[in-house]
Image (cartoon, helix red, strand yellow):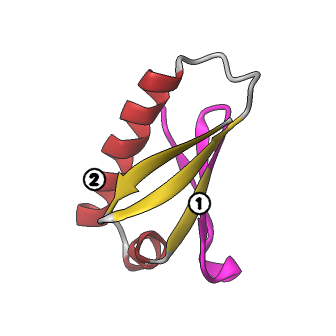
Amino acid sequence: MRILINFQNSLVPVYFNIDNKQPIQRTLKLLTSALENKIRTGKQALQKCLNSLISIEIEGSEAILHSKSEFDSLALSLY
């Protein structure tokens, strides 16, 4: 399943696994909270990834952040 979120004035697709046991709204709240927190206080590598973010994939309790450069893609724990 795919949902679009607004992050840094751009729409970013978030892909969910259908088998995810957590409610989607709760996961989206955790995701947006973590992203906003990391853009303000994260390390330089994480901020570089967030600035070139193209999609997010939710797998269990982790968000895989895909950026324009595959070398900048990261995994972010939501819980």
Task: Determine which quarter of the picture holds residue 29.
Answer: top left
> Hey, what amino acid is under mark 2?
Asn
Residue 54 sits above or below residue 72 on the image = above
Magenta span: 57-79
Q: Position of residue 6 (x, y in %)?
A: 36, 53
Q: Nearer the viewer, residue 32 or 47?
A: 32
**Residue 70, quarter of picture:** bottom right
Instruction: Measure the alpha-carbon separation of dots 2 and 1.
Output: 18 Å
Q: Residue at label 2? A: 37
Mark 1: amino acid: Ser
Q: Residue at x 43, y 59 (%)?
A: 11
The residue carrying pointer 1 sits among few (fewer than 14), some (14 to 19) or many (20 or more) residues within 10 Å by Cα, namely some
* Residue 67 is inside the magenta segment: yes
- Give the answer, above or below, for where 21 lies relative to 54: above
Number of on-image labels = 2
Q: Which residue is mark 1?
A: 55
Q: 17 or 74, which is in the foreground?
A: 17
Image location (x, y in percent) of residue 50? 43, 69
The structure residue drawn at horizontal position 37% and vertical position 72%, both measured from the top left corner, is 43
| Rendering coords of residue 20 (x, y %) | 68, 23
